[in-house]
Image (spheres, rainbow, N blue to C red):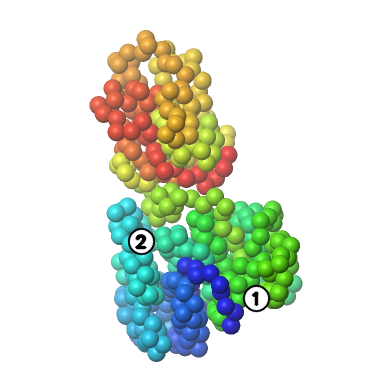
Amino acid sequence: MARVRHPCTIVIKLGTSSIVHEKSHQPLLSTLSSVVETVVALRREGHKVVLVSSGAIGVGLKRMDMASRPKSLSGKQALAAIGQGRLIALWDNLFGQLEQPIAQVLLTRGDIADRTRYLNAVNTFKELLSMGVVPIVNENDTVSVSEIKFGDNDTLSAVTSSMIHADYLFLLTDVDGLYTSNPRKDPLAKQIEVVTSIAAIRSQVSTTTLGSSLGTGGMETKLIAAEIATGAGVSTIICSSKTPENIFSIIEYHSQKSAPGTPQSGLSSGRTSPTLQPSVSNLDTPTLVRPPHTMFTASPLPMRDLKSWTSHTLFPAGSVIIDSGAHSVLSRRESGGRLLAVGVHGVIGAFASGQAVRIVIRRRGSDEPAARIPAPLETRPTTPALVAASSMSSSIASLEPLSRSVSFSSLAEVGSKPSEEVSEADVIEVGRGLANYNSAQILKVKGLNSSYMPQLLGYADSEYVVENVTIRVPP
């Protein structure tokens, strides 16, 4: 077993198909034992490890001697309640044989939607890891409904890795990587070794590699998880659950191969990343054989914690429609992710201040909404003026001077006009953020300079209507 030199924080996700047999629903003890031995060996090397474990419903099926998953939500929740206790007891028994303490952590998206509760969860993880405990995480299926579900434990593992700022996320599954087509059906399928752009890779590979009849995943959910994790700076790896001990070799391999300069394409098949020329210190280092896996490289400019939380853990309560100028500026890293009212065209739905919102743009070809600004402002450019949110610049100061002839009565009249009806079908989501004002207040000030917000709203806690905006779809 390879020795990993530098301690890392590692999240390992194990799917249902790797925990229970698809037909008999019996626990796959050989796989589970190998995972336990690997985790304990990683702990002995000084690494911090979190295990994300599916399988509660599968174990519940065996306990109740049922042939297949029920279709109803309540039926699935009942089986999860039955199976979760037995699943954690199984893990505790196996880890207990090697004297490794574990902790059960059950989460829903609702548990971490509130910022305070999210930070409490982060602190709990940190404390458990500092105590040498292995947290075993699962979604709390007993109480989850569609609005607060992560949807799949691949996503849960990605969010968890983001929460604890992990170095690696390992998605253990029944295939050993991402392929150009389904390797079970196509003998010519080729494994993709390195992915630097998930957006580019989607059109070049098949995501029909099957999830099991017990699981909810498949290769598509792993791409989604990789997108979340790599965006937060976590290197993500898909490899086989049949050989979990390869985790050591994979980390060692990439530690040796790491070098400045990475492949520019989104797909690398049969190639490895460029390496440094051998130096005096590594001339004697043996060349490592590359274990089978697919590596998704971490973003060199990861999202900060608050943006990652906003983008991936909150269920949006409504939408804020922005124009193309605002979209372009918010896509720049130096924008600070802050949206001024001047860039807003409207809202969809009703939401409160502090809630997560979708940031959307009108579909191409849709008519732009009519201008709502008062006559004296019509000579102003329609493209919103947004600037980087830095301590050295003021967004209000960067806007063109407004006509002093605009009266409060004209502003009030503008704010009272009904908004154009726009449906979700008319827009495209490009990102998410946190609303500083409720939907009615944003409607009152849309398209206007922020200096008028105190007059129209009676107060102005912030000149920005939405903050912590993360743009997922670039212009």
Q: Residues within 10 Å of mark 1 (few under 14, many from 20)?
A: some
Residue 352 visible in the picture: yes
371 relative to 355, above or below: above
Image-quadrant location for residue 258? bottom right
Which residue type carries mark 1? Pro
Residue 457 on image: x %, y %: 28, 28
Q: Which residue is mark 1?
A: 291
Name the N-terminal-most of marks 1 and 2: 2
Q: Nearer the viewer, residue 465 or 129?
A: 129
Quadrant in the picture for the C terminus: top right
Judged from the image, the secondary structure of the residue bearing numbered disc 1 is loop
Q: Which residue is mark 2?
A: 122
Q: Nearer the viewer, residue 356 or 388?
A: 388
Q: How many marks?
A: 2
Residue lying at 49% horizontally and 81% vertically, measured from the top left: 41
9 relative to 40, above or below: above
Residue 302 on image: x %, y %: 51, 52
Which residue type carries mark 2? Val
Q: Residues within 10 Å of mark 2 (few under 14, many from 20)?
A: some
Residue lying at 44% horizontally and 72% vertically, measured from the top left: 49
187 relative to 467, above or below: below
